[in-house]
Amino acid sequence: MRLVVQRVKNAKVDVEGKTVGKVDKGFMVLCGITHEDTEKNADLLARKLCNLRVFEDENDKMNLSLKDVGGELLIISQFTLYADGMSSGNRPSFIAAARPEKAEPLYNYFLKKCEEEGIHVEKGIFGANMQVSLLNDGPVTIILEK
């Protein structure tokens, strides 16, 4: 699994002109799943994500997690995180991305594990054409992978 985590002041995702998920302070997360990923990967990354300390404390040090600041998660599935654009030509290959029949259940499992960490989770619609907008805070962008 590969996560691109952006600290945000707010973020939302629209599908066909309708907002399907939105958060205030927290993380907007792009989530890519590959063939080898398992629930064990999702368990580990859910814990890491929900405890990632990138919010400032009273001394302006990145020392607080989502849990500490009452933050929220907007998690968007994105198979293009496993694009291979360097092998040949200019058209990326997506063969490293898991097929939907594997990726969607694992994505939903990951969402559930984040909720079990006590975090409010919003999401996009798996496989849909989505428009994501956000107000990046910092900017802070972290890549988590397992």
Image (spheres, rainbow, N blue to C red):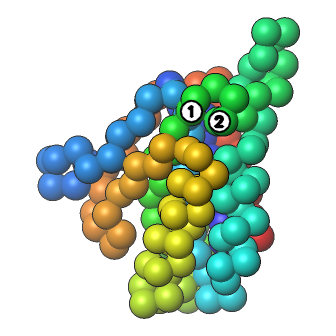
Above or below for 72 versus 114: above
Left or right: residue 17 versus residue 4 is left
Reading the image, the residue beneath label 1 is 71
Q: Residue at x 58, y 56 (%)?
A: 116
Left or right: residue 55 versus residue 114 is right
Question: Distance between the Cα atoms at labels 1 and 2?
Answer: 5 Å
Above or below for 66 versus 91: above
* Disc 1 + disc 2, Cβ < 8 Å: yes
Q: Amino acid at mark 2?
A: Leu
Q: Which mark is residue 140?
A: none
- What quarter of the picture does the N terminus occupy? bottom right
Question: Residue 2 appears at what percent x and percent y?
Answer: 66, 66
Q: Is residue 57 visible?
A: yes
Q: Residue at x 78, y 17 (%)?
A: 57
Comes first in the chain, label 1 or label 2: 2
Q: Which one is nearer the viewer's eye here, 141 or 83?
A: 141
Question: Residue 88 appears at what percent x and percent y?
Answer: 62, 84
Q: SS class of the residue under badge 2?
A: helix
Label 2, residues with CA under 10 Å away: few <14, some 14-19, many ≥20? many
Q: SS class of the residue under badge 1?
A: loop
Q: Amino acid at mark 1?
A: Gly
Label 1, residues with CA under 10 Å away: few <14, some 14-19, many ≥20? many
Reading the image, the residue beneath label 2 is 66
Q: Is residue 143 visible?
A: no
Q: Which one is nearer the viewer's eye here, 98 or 81?
A: 98
Question: Residue 89 appears at what percent x and percent y?
Answer: 56, 80
Q: Residue at x 30, y 56 (%)?
A: 130
